[in-house]
Each structure stands twice: as structure tokens, then as C-alpha cells.
Image: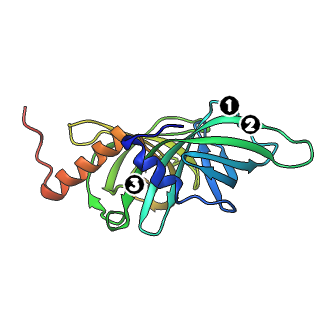
Amino acid sequence: MDLDHDDDLRLDLATTLAPGETVTLYRGDGPLLTVGITSVDGVDVVGAVDPAARVRTADLLTARLYAEDAAWFATFVVRGVAAHADGPAVVELRVGDALRVTSERWSERVPFRCTALIREEAGGDLLRGTTTDLSLTGVGVLVHGDAVPLDAHVGVTLEGDGRGAVTFRGAVVRRAPAPGGQLLGLEVLGVSRADHGRLARLLHRQARDPWGEPPPH
């Protein structure tokens, strides 16, 4: 497979993977897929999965991975699945996209209020809440009424500051009672390059302008 300069991040991510390691990937409709890596060749990864796992060729999987100095948001495309009657199935993956967030920026939580729309991927009503703080890897949201359960996977849209909404896939990693509802801690599991850029720019603007002046017309 020929690779060019645009593939550098994909290759950088692939070098953090090694045979014998296990990674957890997320399907678009929520289920987890645990993959035991058996080989890595460029941006192509081969691994073993439970034969009962629901995975098919052309499925798009997302992952949040950690290296020594960075967190990675990545997509993997399923190139093939081979079932074996007497053992794990073999899945062939290719890194589809990769975003790197350096550790120095993980904890940059910025207070910010905007409307957040949350829907549990397993089904449920659309919840409307208000953000309390943001970072590149997570967000706090105050929701009223019945909140989604802990560890649930959710689709999230943040209204932002009027310069573009931010959409991502997340997991509920914290829940705490709050007046009239629940305060949720959401971890970002998957985000597109465009939405990651909008979130980074929103954080930068908010850090410079904590009073949240509206954008010029």
C-alpha cells in the first residue's frame, strides 16, 4: 500500500499498536469490540475477536487510545472477517483516520455554558442540557429529569458559541445529583477531524474571552 505525507498521523498511531496488545473499539451503534492484535503492517492491523462478536466487512469502528504522551482518536475500517469453528475469529482492520491530542492539553478544562443535546445510542429520548465545562477529551453537562445511565454510549451535539456546533460520540463516566437533575461527566470516544477542530477553536476563544462575547455579525 502506497502512503504519502498525509498518512503520517495514521502511521504514527499504528506504531503505538503491537502484537499481543488488546484494544477496545466501538461500533457506530454502540457495542464494544475487543481485539487482540496479532500483527501490524503499516496502517493495516490484524487481530482476533470473539466469534460471537457482531462485526462485518466495511463496518466503521472508533477508538480512543493512549500512548505515553498523547491520546488518540481514531477510526478503523473493517476490511475482512474470517470465522473459525474452533477459535477466535480473525478481523482485518485499516486505520481510517487519526487525531493526536498531547497530554499537556488533556486537562485544560474551561468553564463554558451552552446547550447540549444528548441521545443514548441504545435508544431513548433526546435530552437537552447545559454544559458546565469543556476540554478536548470531555465535557460536563447538567441535564434535567431522568439522565442516561452510567457507562452508556451517547451521541452529543454542543451548540457552541455561535461559530459552529460540535458533534461527538461519548460515554457517561460520571453521574452526580444536582438541583433539578443530574450532572454528567461525558468522555469523548470518537470525534471527526472537523468537529475536533471546532472544539479546539472554541476552547481557545473561551480561554481568551471568559465572558463569552457574542461573535460579530
Q: Residue furthest front?
A: 2
Q: Secondary structure at mark 2?
A: strand
Q: Quadrant of residue 82?
A: top right
| Residue 116 seen by the camera | no
The circle drawn on residue 202 is none
The circle drawn on residue 57 is 1
Name the quadrant of the C terminus. top left
Amino acid bearing label 1? Thr
Give the residue displayed 47% in from the left and 61% down from the top.
177
Q: Please tell me whether residue 102 is drawn above or below residue 192 in the rendered image.
A: below
Judging by the rendered image, the residue that carries numbered circle 2 is 81
- Residue 120 is left or right of residue 89, and the answer is left
Q: CA distance from mark 2 to mark 3?
A: 28 Å
Judging by the rendered image, the residue that carries numbered circle 3 is 100
Query: Residue 87 location in percent, x, y?
Result: 87, 49
Work out whether residue 162 or residue 125 is closer to the camera in this orientation and state it: 162
Work out whether residue 63 or residue 32 is closer to the camera in this orientation and state it: 63
Q: CA distance from mark 3 to mark 1?
A: 26 Å
Give the residue displayed 67% in from the left and 59% down from the top.
19
